[in-house]
Image (cartoon, helix red, strand yellow):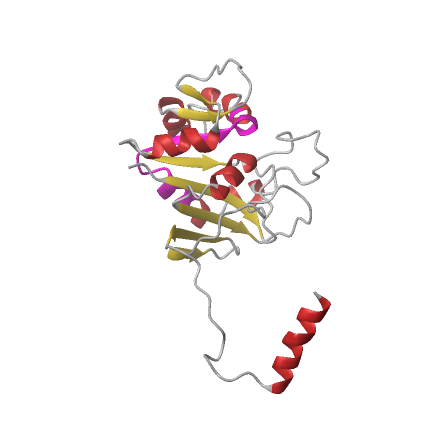
Amino acid sequence: MRKVIVGAFVSMDGVMQSPGGREEDPTSGFRFGGWVAPMADVDPVFGAEVGKLFDQPFDLLLGRRTYDIFAAHWPYAEGGPYDDIAKTFNRITKYVATRKGVDLTWKGSVALSDAAKDVAELKQEDGPALITQGSTELVHALLASGLVDEIRTFTFPVLLGKGKRLFSDDSQPSAFKLTHGVVSPNGLIHATYVRDGEVKTATIGGAEEPSPAELARRAKLKREG
């Protein structure tokens, strides 16, 4: 069975839009395209942990917009500073969530017309992990369908305010556990979370009898709706 791993570069407030360059999404009004690049190029933890993410056997799982960005860059990046990643990306299969019958020009690309249904079927196969990059809408659909097995976040010490975010209100409630974490001297935090069953709830302080004030608070909430 194949795992779905969400790999996400996020700000402190959860924004993941246009991390790699100013021209990734120039018509959206987002002002901070390329917010990852100043630290990514010099941070040793970032390079090491991204390397670990792509060190395992994997295929890419991409939304259409991220696919277009990657397809315009990685086929032409071999021989450059990220030669190893370029060669890997160009060799592996790229699964692309797209509702339009368009031509996917990057070698090894496969269209998925119904992301949640098609990814659920891919997960039942034998094969390498399916790793997302960017692709906010696709990630939201996978989280809403409970298809994500692992989340690897790279949290940068910036506050962006507005922008497309990693999580939406439609995410299926799930518990995760931290299996790996590291903080760089520059303040970048990498964390790996794996699926860990259902969300558990409890009352802080245990099963103590509620105070008269607490009972009154609850009654007030019921009255006021």
Q: Can see residue 85?
A: no
The quadrant of the picture occupied by the C terminus is: bottom right
What is the x, y in percent for residue 50?
Answer: 42, 42
Q: Residue shown at 36%/22% (left/top)? A: 91
Vertical relation: 108 (above or below) 213:
above
What is the x, y in percent for residue 205?
Answer: 48, 80
Looking at the image, which residue sits at the far front?
223
Vertical relation: 22 (above or below) 152:
above
Q: Quadrant of residue 32?
A: top right
Q: Residue shown at 43%/47% (left/top)? A: 151
Vertical relation: 84 (above or below) 224:
above
User: What are the residue bounds of the magenta stretch?
Assistant: 47-67
What is the x, y in percent for residue 190?
Answer: 45, 52
On the picture, is 223 further left or further right than 106? right
What is the x, y in percent for residue 84?
Answer: 37, 30
- Residue 58 among those drawn in magenta: yes
On the picture, is 30 further left or further right than 177? right
- Residue 150 among those drawn in magenta: no
Vertical relation: 49 (above or below) 99:
below
Q: Quadrant of residue 132?
A: top left
Along the line of sight, which residue is nearer the eye, 225 or 22?
225
Along the line of sight, which residue is nearer the eye, 168 or 207?
207
Q: Can see residue 98?
A: yes
Q: Residue shown at 71%/39% (left/top)? A: 31
Along the line of sight, which residue is nearer the eye, 147 or 183?
147
The quadrant of the picture occupied by the N terminus is: top left
